[in-house]
Amino acid sequence: QVQLVESGGGSVQSGGSLRLSCAASGYTYRRISMAWFRQAPGKEREGVAAIDSDGSTSYADSVKGRFTISRDSAMNMLYLQMDSVKPEDSAMYYCAAVSLRYIAQPLGRYQYNVWGQGTQVTVSS
């Protein structure tokens, strides 16, 4: 059974840092693409960062230069390092995965078919 479990959310002040983690199980890990999405109240779920099976990354313009996505295949873990956070980064953050080595639109939510339960991030000004 494929499963994704996020952790690491919490409250942080503007300008601070936070690291999200996602534990993946039930996959042949090295053959999947993964991503982080977020959803704020009243807004649509949006792609934040993605990484394919070769380690190529994609970022939303709003987080480029501040967030870093990485994966540890040996540990079946996905990470999102969030630096210089802003109040507008506040949202529920979700880990997502699909059993494809590469995907055409890595930040498109409909590309992924497995989702975690989410972890809340709140940034105060």
Image (spheres, rainbow, N blue to C red):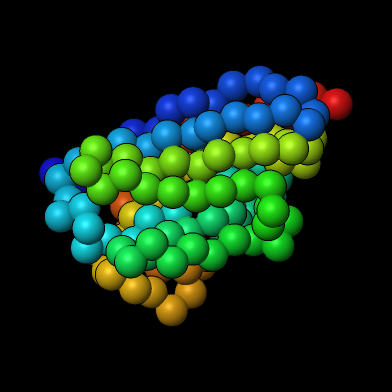
Q: Residue furthest right?
A: 125
Q: Is 117 rendered above or below residue 38?
A: above
Q: Is residue 84 visible from the viewing direction of this image?
A: yes
User: Residue 113 lies in what quarter of the image?
Assistant: bottom left
Picture coordinates of residue 64 (x, y %)? 68, 57
Picture coordinates of residue 43 (x, y %)? 69, 50
Residue at image point 27% right, 69% down: 100
Q: Is 59 rendered above or below residue 16?
A: below
In the image shown, does 73 or 44 lie closer to the viewer?
73
User: Residue 123 lies in what quarter of the image?
Assistant: top right
Residue at image point 34% right, 73% down: 102
Picture coordinates of residue 40 (x, y %)? 67, 42
In the image shown, does 44 or 49 lie closer to the viewer?
49
Name the quarter where the C terminus is drawn.
top right
Picture coordinates of residue 77 (x, y %)? 32, 40
Left or right, residue 18 beside residue 4: right
Left or right, residue 85 beside residue 5: right
In the image shown, does 72 or 90 lie closer to the viewer?
72
User: Residue 122 lies in what quarter of the image?
Assistant: top right
Q: Is residue 41 visible from the viewing direction of this image?
A: no
Name the quarter where the N terminus is drawn.
top left
Left or right, residue 7 beside residue 3: right
Residue at image point 37% right, 37% down: 22
For the image, the number of numbered tags is 0
Residue at image point 49% right, 26% down: 8
Q: Residue furthest bottom?
A: 104
